[in-house]
Amino acid sequence: MSIAVSNTSTESRPRTDGTKRRRPAAVVDFNRITDEQFQIAADHMGLEDEIQLLLRTPYREMVVQVPVRMDNGRLEMFHGYRVQHNAVRGPYKGGIRFHHEVDLNEVRSLAALMTWKTAIVDVPFGGAKGGVTCDPTSMGRAELQALTRGFTRKIDMALGVYRDIPAPDVGTNGQVMAWIMDEYGKKNGYTPGIVTGKPVNLGGSLGREEATGRGVMIITREACKAYGFDIRDARIAIQGFGNVGSWTARLLSQLGAKIVAVSDVSGAIYGEHGLDIDKVVEQVNAFGSVVDMDGARTIDNQELLSLDVDILIPAALGGAITRNNVDGVKAKLIVEAANSPVTPRADEALRQRGTIVVPDILANAGGVTVSYFEWVQNLQQFHWSHERVNQELETKMVRAWDAVYQRSIEEKTPLRIAAFVEGLSKVAEATRQRF
Ligand code: NAD
């Protein structure tokens, strides 16, 4: 499988499946990348062949067709996926992505990453991921609702509070989770624990919306301490200004860091002395994009990646930093807020020149951690305060950082391998106990 690396160089022609035809850019095989990373870690820790076989193979893969009557009266067919990778440590857990580049191979890769991520932060979940190939930005509310409900009906036999619990990802949000919960509830009765990331009013958790960004902030802060950067002086560029990127920007700027550049799919902005992030959020809420912001220079999306900054935080999609653009990257620390933003070739080039890369399965694990808190609150039928959520998140993220960082020092490995080994060890141990 392969998907386009960039969704900026696209052309649009109407298609019958509700998506726009896009010209493919260079392609990245995400599942091959995840598999390679798994293999390096498995070899490093001397994992038995049988356990390797059990851990690398997804448990179940669903491919479903979802017909939707569009606003213009036409019937369109969408393709949806749910991959349940591993559940030896707890129910399958993972987001649902609505994006025009979603395919089974990418979902498979993201599902495996979830298995290692939940183990690293030590929440009792396994790993799963879902997605629908669609362009939610060009769909109306009724179309999105019909698509979400149709997709839920097609996969609901494999969902369950103790079986598989979806959450938001790129292109989905609390509203989409509310529709999933409602559709699932029609057959199964009131079941708030069937999804996380839902609106607080429907049983969602305080602090869930910002959780992934808060986790990225905590890990960036800890990495700065460990590697001798002063976060208050740090100049930071963030690619992607959606849920994760915008919260990361807000929370890091509250620590005193200078967020000098941010971007979204339409372009990037740069402010030499640091952007006023609250104003950028206001502008995005009003006009839908960061570009053309008063007092900031609009720059090219690619230029953001090669700015002279201390820290670069890719928080958009996979395949942002590849062998084609890695030579331009000047940041000394890269924190992967998105999943798989740095390809292995680029990772190797960065390692050789001494750039530290904090891997996705550690850096963006704050979302699933607070999803776990939300699930616990749903089971308990008891709401935690925002303060308690943030405090428990802080504890879990710092503990995960310490474990991965210590392992990287003791075993003289890059953080990515240390993180994989940390996750793999826990899943392998549970597998041995069950088999
Ligand atoms: P989102 O849909 O809210 O935001 C995505 C952002 O990326 C948007 O601002 C979009 O315009 C921008 N973008 C897309 N293509 C771009 C490009 N080529 N250049 C620059 N910007 C571009 O999605 P999100 O929930 O913020 O997720 C972002 C990443 O974080 C994804 O990789 C996702 O898998 C990962 N992640 C999300 C969560 C979560 O809780 N939402 C948890 C863990 C990991």
Image (tube, rainbow, N blue to C red):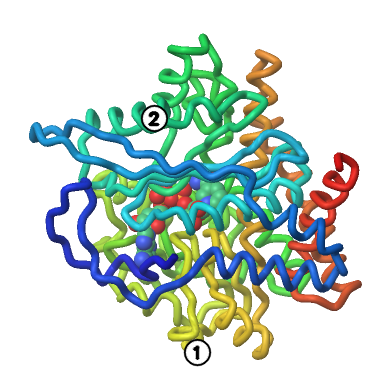
Q: Residue 257: which disc?
A: none
User: How crowded is the residue under tag 1: few (<14 C-alpha within 10 Å), some, or many (20+)?
Assistant: few
Q: Is residue 72 left or right of residue 432?
A: left
Sequence-first disc among 1 and 2: 2
Residue 25 image position (x, y, % from top left): 32, 75
Density class for disc 2 (Cα within 10 Å; few <14, some 14-19, many ≥20) is some
Residue in the picture at 55% in, 28% down: 159
Q: Which one is in front, 165 or 393?
A: 165
The quadrant of the rendering that contains the N terminus is bottom left
- Note whether 400 is above or below 346 in the view shown: above
Q: Quadrant of residue 87?
A: top right
In this rendered view, identify the residue nearer to me: 263 or 99. Answer: 99
Amino acid on which disc 2 is placed? Gln
Q: Which residue is mark 1?
A: 327
* Residue at the image point whose x is 82% and y is 71% from the top: 408
Q: Which residue is mark 2?
A: 175
> Where residue 139 appears, x then y in whole percent?
22, 41
Coordinates of residue 331 in the picture (x, y in percent): 56, 79
Spot occupied by residue 370 in the image (x, y as percentages of width and height): 64, 37
Q: Amino acid at mark 1?
A: Asp
- Ligand 1 quarter of the rendering: bottom left
Q: Is residue 4 left or right of residue 96?
A: left
Q: Secondary structure at mark 2?
A: helix
Closer to us: 299 or 367: 367
Instruction: Residue 346: tell me if it is visible.
Output: yes
Label 2 lies in ligand 1 vicinity (Cβ under 8 Å)? no
Q: CA distance from mark 1 to mark 2?
A: 40 Å
Report helix, strand or loop for mark 1.
helix
Quarter of the rendering containing residue 125: top right
Whether label 1 touches label 2, CB < 8 Å:
no
User: Which is more toward the observer, 71 or 39?
Assistant: 39
Q: Residue drawn at (58%, 60%), measured in percent from left and top?
A: 256
